Amino acid sequence: MSVRMGVFMVLVIACFILIIGKVCYLTLVPSTKAFWAQAANQLIKKDIPIKPRRGNILSDDGKLLVTTLPTYRVAIDYLSGVTEKKIARRSPKNQQRRARELEKRKKLVREHITPLANGLHELLPDYSASYYRNRLLKGFKRQSRSWSIYPKRVDYSTLQEIQKLPLFNLGKYKGGLTFSESLDRKRLFGSLAAITLGVYDSKNSKRALAGIEKSFNEELKGKPGKKDRKKFMTHYLDVIKEPAIDGYDITTTLNIDMQDICDAQVRKEAIDKNADVGVAVLMETKTGQIKAIVNLLKGNDGHYYELSNRAIGDMMEPGSTFKTASLLVALDDGKITLEDSIDVGNGVKEHHGRYIKDWNWRSGGYKRYLSVPEILGFSSNIGTAELIVKHYEKNPQKYIDGLKRIGILDSLGLQIQGGHRPSVITPDSKGWNKTSLAWLSFGYNSQIAPINTLTFYNTIANNGREVKPYFIKKIEGDDGYEKTFEPEVIRSSICSKHALRDIQYMLRYVVEEGTGKLAGNDHFAVAGKTGTAQIYDGKYGYKSGKALGSFCGYFPADNPKYSLIVAFSGKHISSHSGAEVFGRIAERVYAHTEKSNVKLAVPEEKPLFPSIKYGHADELEKVLNTLDIPYESDKITCPWVKVKKDSVNKDLYIFDSPTIHKNIMPNVYGYGAKDAIYLLEKLGLHVSISGYGRVWQQSVRAGTRIHKGNFVTLKLRNY
C-alpha cells in the first residue's frame, strides 16, 4: 500500500513539474509570447471610438428642422439556425444534422413566403406583393445569408412592424430577419430651405458639403469618446473610458411657416413661367434675421430642386433694382432733387455709339419729360443714365465712392459660406469705356448677389441703418455652453435724412403709380422696385433670350417689418413675375403676423364665399366666425370636417368627415396640406407632398389597411 502511494506521489509531482515547466516555456519563450498576446487581444479591444450625436438644427420657434435618426437595412438569412458547412464537414453525423436542418428550414420558408410578401406590400406599398414574393424566392434559391428584402432604408417604427410579419415573428434565429443600423441626417420639412440648412455626409463625419451643416460643422459634430470592449464568457462588455460629447444644437432665424409661404409661391411661379431659377429671401427689417430663403433650380427632369444657394452666391447684373442706388447717390450728393426732370423722348437714346432703350421703346416711349420720381417709378433707363452721366461723367470715381458710402457694395460676412463681395466696373478697370458709367447706372457692369440687393433695400426700410443679415440665433449644448447672436450694425447711417426721405417716397411711388403695382396691396402699403436685366450667356452674349426679372422692397411701408426680394431667371421672364410673387408672399406673411387684424382681409364688398379646404373643425369654424362668413352645421362630433357649398342658394354647410380609424387610410381629398399631413402623421404614416393647393390625389386608396411607418404621397392642386 505504501509502495503504491509512493509511486502515485511521484507521478503527481512529475505532472506538476511538467505543467509548471510548460507554463514557463509558454510565457517566457519569445515565439509563444506573441501567441498569448494575440489571444489576449482577441478578448479585449481597446480605444474603440464612440460616435457622438450630431447636433440638431431648429427653427426660430424651436421646431426641429434637421436631426439625426437611425435607419435600418433589412435583410433575411435563409440559413438561420442551420449548422454551418465548415462544422458539418467535421463528421458524417454533423452532415446529416445539417441536411435535416436545411430541409426543415426550406419547408418553413415555403410556408411563409406568400403571407410575408403580402405583409411587406401592406407595410411598404411602393412595391407590389408579387415584387416582394419574386425577390424573396430569388434569395431563397441562392440560400443567401443576407438577402435584402427592401431597397430603401426604413425607420425604427417600420422595423418594429416588419418584425411582426409572418416568419419574422418567430424570433431572431427561427425567423431569420437581420438588420443593420445607420445614423442618417434627416430634414423633417423636406426640401424647405434645404440648401441653406445644408448637406451632410452621414458616412463621413468630417464631410459637410453646404449651408449651416458645413459652416457650423465644428459645433454640430461633437467630440468622439473611447471605450474598451472585453469578452466575458459569450458576451462582450463595453467599458467607457471617455464619454462622447454630443454636438451642439443650433437655433436658426428661419420661420418654417414663412418659409413654406415663400417656397410655395416661388415654386408655383417657376412652374407656370418655366423659369430656370427662382429665388426669394425674406428678412426682418429691424434685426436682419433671415426668416425664409428659397433657392429653386430646374433639374433635367423639369422638376425644381434646392441644389445651390443662388440667393447668396449668384453674382449677377441686377438690372433696374440698381437704379435706386444710383439715384440715392445723386440725391445724397445734392446733384438732383425730386423736381428735376429728363426728356426721355421716344424711348431710344444714342450714347457714344450705343443705344440706351427704355422698356417701352417699341411703342414709342413716353415722349415727354419725366420727373425724378417718375424716372424711378416707370424704370426709365434713359432718365437714370442721363442724370448720372450729367453729374458724374467728369468725375465717375465720385459716383463709385457714393455707391460704397450707401452700402450697396459692402461685404456682408455672412454666417454661412458662399457669399461674395459685390463689385462694379470702375475707372481703373481694364474694360472701362465711355459707355460704362451709363450702363452701370441702370444695373449692368456689376456683379451683386440677391442678398446684397436685399440688404441695401432693408437699410432704406430701416431708416438708413444697415444691419447684417444673419441665420443663426443661438448655439447651445448639454454641457451648458451657450452662444447667442444679436443684430449687428454695419452702418448707422448711409445717407442724409432728406435723401432717405426722398428715396422712400420714390419707392412707394413705384408701387402706387409705376411698374410695381402688382406688388401692392389694398390693406397695407408696399415700397420697392422692379428689376429686369438681360442675362449674359457665354457665346450668345446678351442675345440668348434669357432675362432676370425681380422685385425688391419692404412692407408695410409705413412701419416696415419685413424686406423681401423675389427673382426669376430664364426665357420669357419679366419683372412682372417678381412683383406679383412679392405681392402674394407679402400678403400671406402679413396675414400670418397680423392675426389680430385678420378682419382687414375682408373687403367691403364680401365675395360670396372663399375657396375653403376641408380640415380641422375648430380651426375652420374660428376662421369663418372671424371673417363673419355665415354657415350651417349639424352637431359636429368629429374633429375633422368637410365643407359643401350649395350652388343654388350659396349656403355653406359643414359636416363630419367619416370616422378616422387607426389602421384604415382616411380620405383626405380636399384637405389643405397642413391638415392632411397632421392627420396622416398622427396615424404614424410618412407623408410627402407635391404641388400646391388642396389634395386631389393620394397614393394609398381610402379604406386600405395601413400600418405605422407606411409611406403615402399626396398630390395638391387648386380646384
Image (cartoon, grey):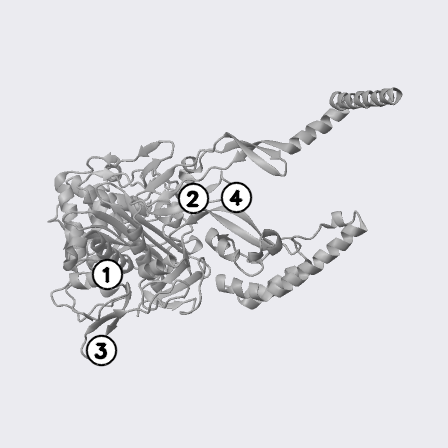
Secondary element type, mark 3: loop
Instruction: Return the residue at label 4.
Output: 203
Q: Position of residue 691 (x, y in %)?
A: 36, 63
- Of circles 1 and 4, the one toward us is 1
Please state, as top left, top right, bottom left or bottom right, where the C terminus lies in the image. Answer: bottom left
If you read the primary sequence from the N terminus, does the residue marked by circle 2 or circle 4 appear first? 4
Mark 1: amino acid: Asp
If you read the primary sequence from the N terminus, does the residue marked by circle 1 or circle 3 appear first? 1
Q: What residue is shown at x 71% (from left), y 50% (from top)? A: 84
Question: Residue 328 appears in which quarter of the rendering?
Answer: top left
Instruction: Return the residue at label 3.
Output: 647
| Mark 3 crowd level (few <14, some 14–19, many ≥20, 10 Å Cα) | few
| Mark 4 crowd level (few <14, some 14–19, many ≥20, 10 Å Cα) | few
- Of circles 3 and 2, the one toward us is 3
Secondary element type, mark 1: helix
- Does residue 333 appear to the left or right of 436 in the view shown? left
Q: What residue is shown at x 26% (from left), y 66% (from top)? A: 637
- Does residue 215 appear to the left or right of 154 in the view shown? left
Instruction: Return the residue at label 1.
Output: 618
Up/down of 574 relative to 6, above or below = below
Q: Is there any visible trace of residue 22 in the rendered image?
A: yes
Question: Residue 611 appears in which quarter of the rendering?
Answer: bottom left
> Cα distance, mark 1 to mark 2?
41 Å
> Cα distance, mark 1 to mark 3?
25 Å
> Cα distance, mark 3 to mark 2?
52 Å
Q: Is there any visible trace of residue 389 in the rendered image?
A: no
Instruction: Return the residue at label 2.
Output: 210
Please state, as top left, top right, bottom left or bottom right, where the N terminus lies in the image. Answer: top right
If you read the primary sequence from the N terminus, does the residue marked by circle 3 or circle 2 appear first? 2
Up/down of 6 relative to 261, above or below = above
Q: What residue is shown at x 23% (from left), y 52% (from top)? A: 529
